[in-house]
Image (spheres, rainbow, N blue to C red):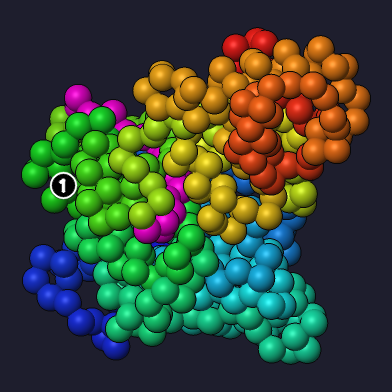
């Protein structure tokens, strides 16, 4: 999240009432109360750990862009080459310019913020950083900055289904109508697109007096969503099975009269990723015997790909996954970097009848000591066994190379009761 001095620009004012009052409070806090992130009373708006590649890009950014940055994570996912990325609450453009370098000359990054003064700083360095990060464009930029509200993306100039990735860094907590923001993001994403973002959450619902406190609001605590409410909201919109990537407890040192308003509340800085995969995800993760193998071809993740707190994929290692995870890897921009396949068809612990056929096929293979490719081998089995074996080949190895090595792997897994 990045806030710069000045109130919301008059050209951006399209809402009124309590929404406008909250925006004014936020603008005042970051323009008047705080001079730098050293003045913060909590760790909520402190910069999270960055990957090495992002740090290298940051080191090339002007100090003016960096000095007013307040974030609670590093919400920039891998595999951004050639992507269209939208950064909500971009401020002076730190994350926009990191993404600019990552998407390359064929990608595009849009930064949106409600403060025109922040965008003036971001635009000030646009041509210079374009020459630095995308020299192939010969002076043109792959970056655009828009003044507007994240609750009104289309009015700000962001077209529906136009983005591969949307990111935000600790800004949604500052918005009064969070459901509307998530809904806007959902419709802005292309099918298969990803919303990757960091924000502050709580372990219970926050009292009204705490939500209205200017200090708590400015420190990103007063507007924190209860984690269960967050899940209910996003799933009602269509972001089923949101994935937590990181979660860190927020420490704070507040005046006693303010501390008393949140005394029993625990706050967390969390990074989530959610996908727009219409009709391909379920509310609960179901096990259908799927497995996925990371090919190790992502430059940012040469050895291991971490999808979320539950799934870690070492290069070249087959990992059992639920169907939601398999569909995320199949139908998002991560598809070229994974090989997903169904090892055995089962649901709720009931193994499919094909398991019996696999055992019979294994016995036949052992009997004839097949060493050649299965599809070319000949052996003496009954007609029924051969039919079942052929079914297995179609079911288990449709995407795999039909070699003895693959079949031997399947048989060994069966013997271990995979």
Question: Which residue corresponds to the image point at 60% horizontal and 69% vertical from the top-left?
Answer: 83
The outermost residue toward the right is: 371
* Residue 286 seen in this snapshot: yes
On screen, residue 132 versus residue 196, left or right, reads right
Residue 353 at what x, y percent from top left? 49, 22
Q: Is residue 66 visible?
A: no
Q: Residue at x 34, y 69 (%)?
A: 187
Which quadrant would residue 80 be assigned to in this image?
bottom right
- Residue 216: percent from the left, percent from the top? 24, 45
Instruction: Report the residue at 64% width, 41% height from top.
Output: 394
Does residue 181 appear to the left or right of 396 in the view shown? Answer: left
The answer to whether residue 113 is above or below residue 266 is: below
Q: Which residues make up the magenta segment?
A: 263-278
Quarter of the image for the C terminus: give it.
top right
Comparing 417 with 240, the one in front is 417
Residue 16 versus residue 38: which sits nearer the camera? Answer: 16
């Amino acid at each position: 999240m990045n806030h710069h001095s000045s109130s919301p620009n008059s050209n951006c004012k399209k809402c009124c009432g309590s929404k406008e009052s909250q925006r004014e409070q936020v603008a005042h806090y970051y323009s008047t109360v705080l001079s730098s992130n050293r003045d913060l009373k909590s760790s909520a708006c402190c910069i999270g750990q960055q990957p090495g590649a992002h740090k290298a890009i940051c080191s090339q950014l002007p100090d003016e862009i960096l000095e007013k940055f307040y974030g609670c994570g590093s919400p920039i996912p891998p595999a951004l080459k050639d992507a269209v990325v939208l950064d909500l609450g971009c401020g002076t453009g730190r994350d926009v310019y990191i993404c600019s370098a990552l998407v390359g000359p064929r990608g595009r990054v849009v930064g949106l913020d409600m403060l025109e003064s922040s965008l003036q700083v971001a635009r000030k360095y646009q041509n210079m950083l374009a020459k630095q990060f995308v020299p192939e464009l010969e002076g043109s930029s792959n970056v655009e900055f828009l003044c507007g509200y994240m609750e009104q993306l289309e009015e700000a100039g962001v077209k529906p289904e136009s983005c591969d990735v949307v990111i935000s860094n600790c800004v949604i907590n500052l918005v009064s109508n969070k459901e509307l923001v998530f809904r806007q993001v959902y419709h802005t994403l292309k099918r298969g697109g990803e919303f990757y973002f960091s924000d502050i959450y709580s372990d219970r619902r926050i009292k009204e007096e705490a939500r209205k406190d200017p200090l708590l609001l400015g420190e990103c605590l007063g507007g924190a969503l209860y984690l269960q409410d967050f899940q209910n909201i996003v799933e009602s919109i269509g972001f089923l099975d949101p994935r937590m990537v990181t979660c860190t407890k927020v420490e704070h040192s507040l005046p006693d009269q303010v501390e008393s308003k949140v005394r029993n509340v625990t706050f967390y800085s969390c990074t989530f990723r959610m996908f727009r995969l219409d009709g391909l995800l379920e509310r609960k993760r179901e096990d259908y015997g799927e497995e996925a193998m990371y090919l190790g071809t992502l430059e940012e993740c040469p050895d291991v790909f971490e999808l979320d707190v539950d799934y870690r994929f070492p290069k070249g290692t087959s990992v059992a996954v639920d169907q939601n995870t398999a569909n995320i890897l199949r139908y998002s921009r991560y598809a070229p970097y994974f090989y997903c396949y169904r090892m055995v068809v089962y649901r709720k612990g009931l193994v499919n009848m094909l398991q019996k056929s696999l055992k019979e096929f294994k016995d036949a293979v052992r009997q004839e000591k097949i060493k050649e490719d299965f599809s070319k081998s000949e052996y003496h089995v009954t007609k029924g066994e051969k039919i079942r074996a052929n079914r297995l080949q179609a079911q288990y190895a449709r995407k795999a190379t039909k070699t003895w090595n693959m079949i031997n792997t399947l048989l060994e897994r069966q013997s271990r009761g995979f």
